Image (cartoon, helix red, strand yellow):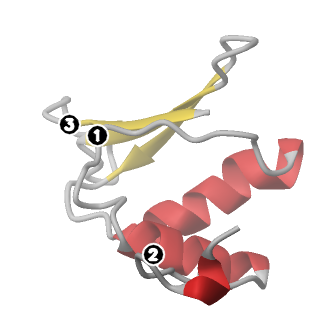
């Protein structure tokens, strides 16, 4: 799944001026979700769960352009929503090698 924000669109009746695009790289299926420019990482993670995960499960890979909304808060909130946690390793630490 690739994810990207598209902004500077004409506002809709609720003031949304952008979309969050989720694209399946295999089937090319697209889900577009209207968002405001002030969308947070937590909101983006919830939109992913509601619009992708709920219908298709967790994809094998994510692709993003490292938008500040995705890194790192998006992942932290997504793992919290899924009931898992992200443990970061440190270089040259024997317990994480392997």
Q: Is residue 74 visible?
A: yes
Placement of the N terminus among the 4 image quadrants: top right
Report helix, strand or loop for mark 2: helix
For disc 1, the neighbor class at 10 Å (few under 14, some 14 to 19, many from 20) is many
C-alpha separation, residue under disc 3 versus residue under disc 1: 4 Å
Image vertical order of residue 6 relative to residue 74, above or below: above
8 or 5: nearer the eye?
5
Q: What label does residue 68 carry, if any?
A: none
Report helix, strand or loop for mark 1: strand
Q: Residue furthest left?
A: 8
32 or 77: nearer the eye?
77
Q: Is residue 12 visible?
A: no
Which image quarter: residue 10?
Answer: top left
The residue at 59%/68% (across/down) is 46
Image vertical order of residue 24 relative to residue 68, above or below: above
**Residue under label 1:** 18
For the residues carrying marks 1 and 2, which lies nearer the camera in this image?
Answer: 2
For disc 2, the neighbor class at 10 Å (few under 14, some 14 to 19, many from 20) is some
Rendered location of residue 65, percent (x, y): 30, 38
Placement of the C terminus among the 4 image quadrants: bottom right
Contact check, label 3 and label 1, Cβ < 8 Å? yes
- 74 to the left or right of 61: left
Report helix, strand or loop for mark 3: loop
The residue at 50%/69% (across/down) is 75
Rendered location of residue 36, percent (x, y): 28, 55
Image vertical order of residue 17 relative to residue 92, above or below: above
The residue at 75%/82% (across/down) is 84
**Residue under label 2:** 42
C-alpha separation, residue under disc 1 versus residue under disc 2: 17 Å
Q: What label does residue 7 carry, if any?
A: 3
Rendered location of residue 97, percent (x, y): 62, 73
The residue at 44%/68% (across/down) is 74
């Amino acid at each position: 799944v690739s994810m990207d924000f598209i902004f500077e669109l004409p506002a809709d009746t609720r003031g949304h001026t952008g979309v969050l695009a989720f694209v399946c790289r295999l089937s090319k299926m697209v889900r577009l979700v209207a968002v405001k420019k002030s969308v947070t990482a937590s909101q983006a993670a919830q939109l992913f769960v509601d619009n992708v995960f709920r219908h298709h499960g967790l994809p094998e890979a994510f692709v993003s352009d490292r938008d500040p909304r995705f890194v790192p808060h998006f992942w932290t909130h997504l793992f919290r929503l899924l009931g898992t946690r992200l443990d970061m390793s440190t270089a040259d630490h024997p317990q994480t090698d392997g």
